């Protein structure tokens, strides 16, 4: 198993490489092992996928920091790959308090994490501009204090929080870049035209989230536009849950078990198992 410093160096190298890489999102140790077995170069945790596994709503108000970091720890222990953490708003509104999450993330084995500008509180919504920048600055300071390069991703959440303001999203991304974030991220990019508009305004590596709303996009599209990193958020966890639900409904509603004909055998399931 590589050391954390070696994983961190590899993660930095992936972002510096002149190509796009896919960083899929496991929700537990078993899914992390499968994605490792399939040859991906790095992984990222998913708050929504983990919440789905717990039967909880997505968001820091439903799954607390300690619980999320324990999930991150289990995933990091299950793979030799670098792992980035989806840590919501870093579990605090105050910039300094949010920044205390960064060393805890490193202690859990992560070599990078995200901080987003959504408060995880519907009554508050997106943090104000200046406050959001202060939060990124504090997180950057905490990341730089670590004994290895820790990749900090700053997320502008407007587009997936019903704030359809691309100009403000770009303004925030540029400010987060100036504040020292290593990677920029704006979930909710709908198409290549919007993607190119955003990328024309920033210079740091950009993480593109691909989900049900923009599933027409491909790795080739992202590469041509200049994207450095692609993630899928909770999509793989939802895909697993969709298969489970379809099989359970067949039993409950039809009294049949035809889903069993397409199940994977023991050899194919071996990557799920540790040891």
Image (spheres, rainbow, N blue to C red):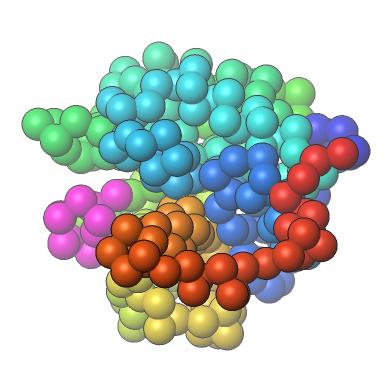
Q: Which residue lies furthest to the left in this view?
A: 123
Decide if residue 118 is in sight here.
yes
Q: Percent x, y for residue 58?
A: 32, 39
* Residue ID at (32%, 69%): 254
Decide if residue 110 is in sight here.
no
- Viewer-side residue, 9 vs 58: 58
* Residue ID at (82%, 34%): 5
Q: What stretch is highlighted in magenta?
A: 157-167
Q: Percent x, y for residue 183?
A: 53, 51
Q: Indicate left or right for 169 with 164 as reference.
A: right
- Viewer-side residue, 113 vs 27: 27
- Viewer-side residue, 266 vs 110: 266
Q: Which residue lies furthest to the front in this view?
A: 255
Q: Percent x, y for residue 270?
A: 79, 55
Report which quarter residue 146 is drawn in.
top right
147 w.r.t. 127: above or below: above
Report which quarter residue 117 is drawn in.
top left
Q: Indicate left or right for 219 with 190 as reference.
A: right
Report which quarter residue 20 is drawn in.
bottom right
Q: Indicate left or right for 167 with 17 as reference.
A: left
Q: Percent x, y for residue 155?
A: 39, 47
């Amino acid at each position: 198993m590589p050391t954390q410093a070696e994983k961190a160096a590899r993660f930095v190298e992936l972002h510096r490489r002149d190509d796009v890489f896919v960083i899929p999102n496991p929700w537990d140790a078993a899914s992390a092992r499968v994605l490792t077995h399939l040859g991906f170069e790095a992984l990222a945790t998913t708050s929504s996928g983990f919440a789905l596994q717990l039967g909880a709503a997505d968001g820091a108000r439903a799954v607390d920091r300690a619980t999320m970091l324990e999930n991150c720890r289990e995933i990091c222990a299950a793979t030799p790959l670098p792992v980035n953490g989806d840590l919501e708003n870093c579990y605090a509104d105050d910039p300094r308090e949010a920044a205390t999450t960064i060393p805890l993330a490193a202690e859990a084995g992560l070599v990078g994490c995200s901080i987003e500008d959504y408060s995880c509180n519907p009554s508050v919504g997106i943090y104000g501009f200046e406050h959001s920048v202060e939060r990124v600055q504090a997180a950057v300071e905490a990341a730089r204090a670590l004994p290895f390069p820790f990749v900090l991703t700053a997320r502008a959440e407007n587009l997936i929080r019903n704030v359809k303001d691309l100009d403000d999203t770009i303004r925030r991304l540029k400010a987060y870049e100036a504040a020292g974030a290593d990677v920029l991220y704006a979930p909710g990019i709908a198409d290549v035209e919007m993607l190119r508009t955003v990328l024309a305004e920033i210079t740091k590596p950009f993480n593109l989230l691909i989900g049900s709303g923009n599933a027409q996009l491909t790795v080739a599209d992202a590469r041509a536009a200049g994207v450095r990193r692609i993630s899928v958020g909770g999509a793989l966890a939802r895909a697993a849950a969709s298969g489970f639900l379809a099989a359970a409904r067949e039993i409950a509603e039809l009294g049949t078990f035809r889903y069993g004909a397409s199940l994977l055998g023991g050899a194919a399931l071996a990557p799920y198992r540790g040891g």
